[in-house]
Amino acid sequence: MGHDLVVLGGGPGGYAAAFRAAAHGLDVALVERDAVGGTCLHRGCIPSKALLHVAEVLGEVERAEVLGLRLRFDGIDADDLGAFRDGVVAKLHKGLAGLVAKRTTPYRGTGRIVEADGGVAVEVTDDGGGTEVVTGRHVVVATGSRPRTLPGIEVDGERVQTSDEALFAAPPRSAVIVGGGAIGMEFASMWRPMGAEVTVVEALDRVLPLEDADVSRTLQRSLGRRGVEILTSARLQSVEPDGDGVRVEVTVDGDTRVLNVERALIATGRAPVTDEVGLESFDVLDEGGFVRTDAWGATGVPGLWAVGDITAGPALAHAAFAEGFAVADRIAGRPHAQPVDHIHTPRVIYSHPEVASVGLTEAQARERYGDDAVAVTTSSLHGNAKGIIANSDGFVKVVHAAGAPPVGSPGDGGAVLGVHIIGPHATDLIGEATLATSWEAVPAELAAITHAHPTLYEALGEAFQSAAGLPFHGA
């Protein structure tokens, strides 16, 4: 067998598995048909966060007068905006490509899983049509995902777009965003400060339906105050190009509305890329096209593994990192290797304000343990010094097991089951909460940790103090 491990796909899950396996001393091949880094680096996480940073700066410019600044905003230069976005991506790609060349044997081409010598291998077809079969003791498939579209809606890439196209086009003057999940909320937060009139159409009764309901309501109110119109429990009837724009027809509360906008963004999630890599021949796909695996990422085919967006776990780059690490540890036979428990995978949304969470929502905790066994404690950012300076809505919500007020020792009170944050830098603040849920910490332990003042993260400390029955500023 040519290699210890062959990885198909150079996105986060793929290169995480490759780099961790190489760190264990394994011989690794990495097959990628495009630039390494995957959707996250080139068409998702990184370019979108670069543009969201610009939107955040614009938001500060809008309130400059309140800060005592006399600023003048002369508009957006689309070329310079694109150069900033692309420069961030290029810098990261250069570093990643260097690591791939150093730590793996890279193969450039389109890979396909095939049978070879009683096992599995990757057949690689290069741009010239030549083929080569790359073999190894193990094969990890990490081919990622693509934007999910809706039946009957034609995406032309200009007037009707997915995130793939929208990230590389000039900001629209007006837009309808179909979908109120993470992608939709990030684009609404990006485009509105850039001057777009934005309407979000969501089929369910609230945006961010997978997040805690209190967080969803707060984000919806906050975006509404910024001029984003959000239509929930809305039924999309049609999206049709109309002249230089788009005609969107939607039904809300039995009434039909017609929205004429410059652009429509279809932000209805992502679909696994498993329909063109040979997996259909191995009976490892479920009805949704996802690869069936065990907790370790192993399929039912010996030597064949899968990580990242092609599995049923969360479609997050850091979730793919964790899965890639776990697979490589397992393949290398590390004695203390552990499978990934995604209940402790932080969920992050770069809306304005930001949203981050880990563990169970309040509804999930009550469903699992019963109402009497669950308690909730909230610490508002309205009384937090840095929150006031940032003029942001937000709070920290701790979901924990109910118990008698503790005296400060582990075992008193209940374990932290989930933490939900909305506010400035929530995606950074979630780190401490991830430790809390992963280590099954109790509020009393966390309340004993000294949090710097004035900081945003001291809101976590105040929430844990209140949950421990030792409130400081809060009730």
Image (cartoon, helix red, strand yellow):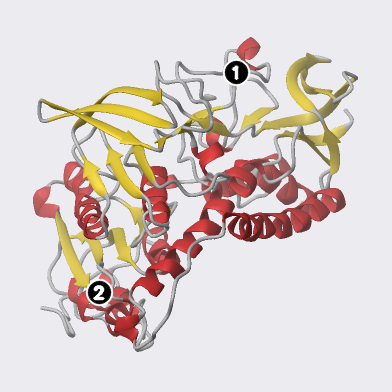
Whichever of labels 2 and 1 marks the residue nearer the N terminus, that label is 1
Among the 4 quarters of the image, the one containing residue 242: top left
Among the 4 quarters of the image, the one containing residue 467: bottom left
Residue at 28% from the left image edge and 75% from the top image edge: 391
Residue picked out by circle 2: 381
Residue that extends furthest to the top in the rendered view of this protein: 281
* Label 1 secondary element: loop
C-alpha span from label 2 to label 1: 46 Å
Residue at 73% from the left image edge and 53% from the top image edge: 93
Give the side of residue 14 with respect to residue 268, left or right: right
- In this orientation, which residue lies closer to the viewer: 100 or 149? 149
Q: In the rendered view, tell whether residue 83 sits above or below residue 36.
A: below
The amino acid type of the residue labelled 2 equals: Leu
Please provide percent x and percent y for residue 328: 68, 44
Q: Quarter holding the C terminus?
A: bottom left
Q: In the rendered view, tell whether residue 127 sits above or below residue 446.
A: above
- In this orientation, which residue lies closer to the viewer: 146 or 362? 146
The tag on residue 275 is 1
Pointer 1 local density, CA inside 10 Å: few below 14, some 14–19, many at least 20:
few
Q: In the rendered view, tell whether residue 372 sits above or below residue 280.
A: below
* Label 2 secondary element: helix
Give the side of residue 227 with respect to residue 90, left or right: left
Give the side of residue 221 with respect to residue 151, left or right: left
The amino acid type of the residue labelled 1 equals: Asp
- In this orientation, which residue lies closer to the viewer: 63 or 465? 63
Residue at 48% from the left image edge and 49% from the top image edge: 171
Q: In the rendered view, tell whether residue 149 sits above or below residue 193.
A: above
Residue that extends furthest to the front in the rendered view of this protein: 243
Please provide percent x and percent y for residue 9: 70, 35
Residue 319 seen in the figure: yes
The tag on residue 376 is none
